[in-house]
Amino acid sequence: MELDRYAQSELKAIFSEERKIKLWLDVELAVLKAWETEGVIPEGTYKAVLSNAKVDIKRMKEIESVVHHEIIAFLTALSENVGEKSRFIHLGLTSSDILDTATSLQIKEANDVIYQELENLEAILKDLVIKTKDVLCVGRTHGVHAEPITFGFKLANFLLELKRNKERLQNAAKEAAVGKISGAVGTYAHLNPDIERLALEELGLKPLEISTQIIPRDIFANVFSAWALIGAFIERLALEIRHLQKTEVLEMEEPFYEGQKGSSAMPHKRNPILCERLDGMSRILRGNLVVALENTALWHERDISHSSVERMIIPESAILTHYMIKTMSRILRDCRIYPDNMMENLNFRGKLICSQRLLLELVRKGMLRENAYKIVQTLAMKAFNEKINFEEIVRKDPEIKSYLSEEELNDVFDYKYFVRYVDEIISRIL
């Protein structure tokens, strides 16, 4: 299975068949314990069942091949080990009490791991922001040179987005840390609310105020939204790195390790394969979000049209989100940054990037804005089209010289002016 290529051990364990069965068992045992606490079943039942509470997955699959119902197969395999006291297991429950509550536990465990990886990525990105906050580079709009910024300022924008994603994930995870032990249509007809409260407390989940036979799927869709937005953030950062790695730009480069080969045909190639991989994965997360949204509209108190879908999209999205964060951490930790190339790009056509500063200084000295714009644009286009130095032709232009002194022109072409507030801006998020 291709997903195994990207599944890290932590997430693989959470969504393993063994873990799923263990969580089903945990839910059943928590309910059993609650029944005993309420005095409905004989004292000592929980302890007796616990000592023999095992499910052989192979045996369970054999049973399922006959009954075509995985929870019945699970309960049958469990009862074969537990014996006579198995009659107290699954008392008053429906399959979704087990399935949905266990799914919530899996999502909760996955979110805990994903959040920790976001914390790790934040620390790496924050360190890079601090190290490069004074490194001058080109700011681009539409992919075209705009005005000077610093590389740390560029990365600080991503750092703030990461912080927003952490908050979104926390909120979605908190909302999704719920279970339901309320029976066939959610009315506790064969249970009572105290059983649900006690069982979910044991499991570390909260009860829903109202459920049907299932946990409403808008709750899970919100988690998918948080995962997809994390993916979109990583995609945006990966896309930035891909542009900066272009041969004609080459301001930043993803890691290229010793022994690595970039092309079967061209030995010189160092391609941004990790960033491209992440950009592709983000598309899957967005697609799965759409499917999760489709799962919210189910018939009456429930159907199972969502079930087959979730078997695929929940582990896939959690695993890919986790992989994407870990991979971006590796990229930023081992990346190469080229300040000399940044300065060379800044100086393109003789500091052409300082045109707005020149325009505003001419206006400040009394020139009409329309006239100033025309003069500066004419010189800028001449420098661009004829591949000549913009600063040199500006300093020679008689009309500009009549407004601005040499010292004032020195200030016009001083990059420090453009980034004088960068420290203050970055300090807001550090």
Image (cartoon, helix red, strand yellow):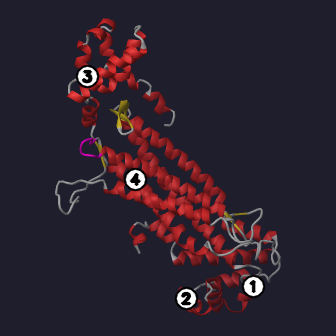
Sequence-first tag of 1 and 2 = 2
Residue 350 appears in the figure:
no
Cβ atoms at labels 3 and 1 below 8 Å apart: no
User: What amino acid type should be assigned to the residue bearing mark 3?
Assistant: Phe
Horizontal placement of 317 versus 69: left or right?
left
Q: CA distance from mark 4 to mark 3?
A: 39 Å
Q: CA distance from mark 4 to mark 1?
A: 49 Å
Name the spot of residue 7 as percent of width and height, x first: 43, 67
Name the spot of residue 94 as percent of width and height, x first: 72, 79
State the residue position of label 4: 328
User: What amino acid type should be assigned to the residue bearing mark 4?
Assistant: Met
State the residue position of label 1: 88
Bounds of the magenta span?
245-250
Sequence-first tag of 4 and 3 = 4
Secondary structure, mark 3, is helix
Q: In the figure, residue 43 lies in which quadrant?
A: bottom right
Sequence-first tag of 4 and 2 = 2
State the residue position of label 3: 390
Circle 3 packing at 10 Å, graded few (<14), some (14-19), many (20+), is many
Sequence-first tag of 3 and 1 = 1
User: Is the N terminus in the top left, top right, bottom left or bottom right quadrant?
Assistant: bottom left
Circle 4 packing at 10 Å, graded few (<14), some (14-19), many (20+), is many
Sequence-first tag of 4 and 1 = 1
Name the spot of residue 79 as percent of width and height, x first: 66, 89
Secondary structure, mark 2, is helix
Cβ atoms at labels 2 and 3 below 8 Å apart: no
Circle 1 packing at 10 Å, graded few (<14), some (14-19), many (20+), is some
Asked whether 212 falls inside the magenta stretch, the response is no
Q: Main secondary structure of the magenta part?
A: loop
The residue at 53%/57% (across/down) is 227
